[in-house]
């Protein structure tokens, strides 16, 4: 799929991988809706960055865990851009909890992470699917994590939620074929604000990776764009982790 002149919705688009993806899509001629939940200033800054480069973008608030807000957001994007051709399900949250502290993984934590990380991606895919089907083409990329493959990560509920995202990707690929492709980009460690307060740990990790570098948000964004473009691929988990899990 040629991305130029398409319209995209990127959830959690104000920071990190989301921002890098918005900028990468805009560089390819895509009109970008930059979704945010709380990071309004960052989302609006992302829009300004795109506008200064001659691109087209809008910031739009919605909590992806709330279906009604997601549907309203999608309608607003279509009103502005005419349709939605591309969806990047990037919005995710976590809690840092030691794996052996099972009591700390409360019902509240489980619900919070699954509401955003899993149900939120489903709600967004469901909301945009009718517009993509109308155009008889569309592409969705979900952001997974190697935590969903290894069972490790910032917390046990987070790792399980990302494993669920990988399963969701396969099921959506079946449900939305043949018009809509659904794939999952699976990053390893990425130098984003999720490492805030643990920068030394990140620096110690880098030399132990096969490529001896931590991925940047731009690395992941470039591959997200490639996955959106690839017309012969659906239901796939593609790991981008500098060899971390090899």
Image: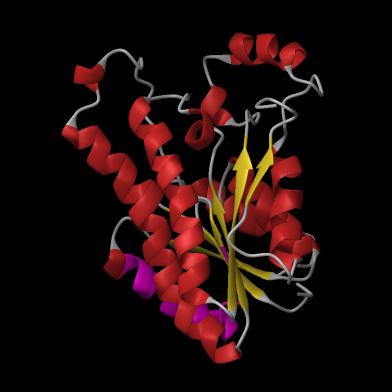
Q: Position of residue 149 (x, y in %)?
A: 52, 35
Residue positioned 47% across, 77% down in the render? 129
- Give 79 or 163, whichever is nearer the viewer: 163
How is the model colour-coded? secondary structure
Q: Residue at x 67, y 14 (%)?
A: 205
Corner quadrant of residue 10: bottom right
| Quadrant in the picture for the C terminus | top right
Magenta span covers which residues?
A: 69-87
> Looking at the image, can residue 63 be seen?
no
Measuring from the top left, give residue 152's x and y in whole percent: 47, 24
Compared to residue 88, the image places residue 74 above or below, namely: below
Vertical comparison of 23 with 67: above or below: above
- Where residue 2 appears, as percent x and y from the top left, is 79, 75
Left or right of 175, for residue 235: right
Quarter location, residue 211: top right
191, 51: nearer the viewer: 191
Position of 17 relative to 78 (above/below): above
Total labels: the figure holds 0
Percent x, y for residue 236?
62, 55
Do we see residue 197 in this rendering? yes
Magenta span includes 81 = yes
At a point 80% along the width and 19% down the height, the residue shown is: 212
Name the foreground residue: 31 vs 153: 153
Q: Residue at 25% of width from left, 25% of height from top? A: 105
- From this view, report whether residue 124 is shown above or below residue 115: below
Q: Main secondary structure of the magenta part?
A: helix
Closer to the camera in the image, 76 or 144: 144
- When asked about the image quadrant of residue 123, the answer is bottom left
The N terminus, quarter of image: bottom right
């Amino acid at each position: 799929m040629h991305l130029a002149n398409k319209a995209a919705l990127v959830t959690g688009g104000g920071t990190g991988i989301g921002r890098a993806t918005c900028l990468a899509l805009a560089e390819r001629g895509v009109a970008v809706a930059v979704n945010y939940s709380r990071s309004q200033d960052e989302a609006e800054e992302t829009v300004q960055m795109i506008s200064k480069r001659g691109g087209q973008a809008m910031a739009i608030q919605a909590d992806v865990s709330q279906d009604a807000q997601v549907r309203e957001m999608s309608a607003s994007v279509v009103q502005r851009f005419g349709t939605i051709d591309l969806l990047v399900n990037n919005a995710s949250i976590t809690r840092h909890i030691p794996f052996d502290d099972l009591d700390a993984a409360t019902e509240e934590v489980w619900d919070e992470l699954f509401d955003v990380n899993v149900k939120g991606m489903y709600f967004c895919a469901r909301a945009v699917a009718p517009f993509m089907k109308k155009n008889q083409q569309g592409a969705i990329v979900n952001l997974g994590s190697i935590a969903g493959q290894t069972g490790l990560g910032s917390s046990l509920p987070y790792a399980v939620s990302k494993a669920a995202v990988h399963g969701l990707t396969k099921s959506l690929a079946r449900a939305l074929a043949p018009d809509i492709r659904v794939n999952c980009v699976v990053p390893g460690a990425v130098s984003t604000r999720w490492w805030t307060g643990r920068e030394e740990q990140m620096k110690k990790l880098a030399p132990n990776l096969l490529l001896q570098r931590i991925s940047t948000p731009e690395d992941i964004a470039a591959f997200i764009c490639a996955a959106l473009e690839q017309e012969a691929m659906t239901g796939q988990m593609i790991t981008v982790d500098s060899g971390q899990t090899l």
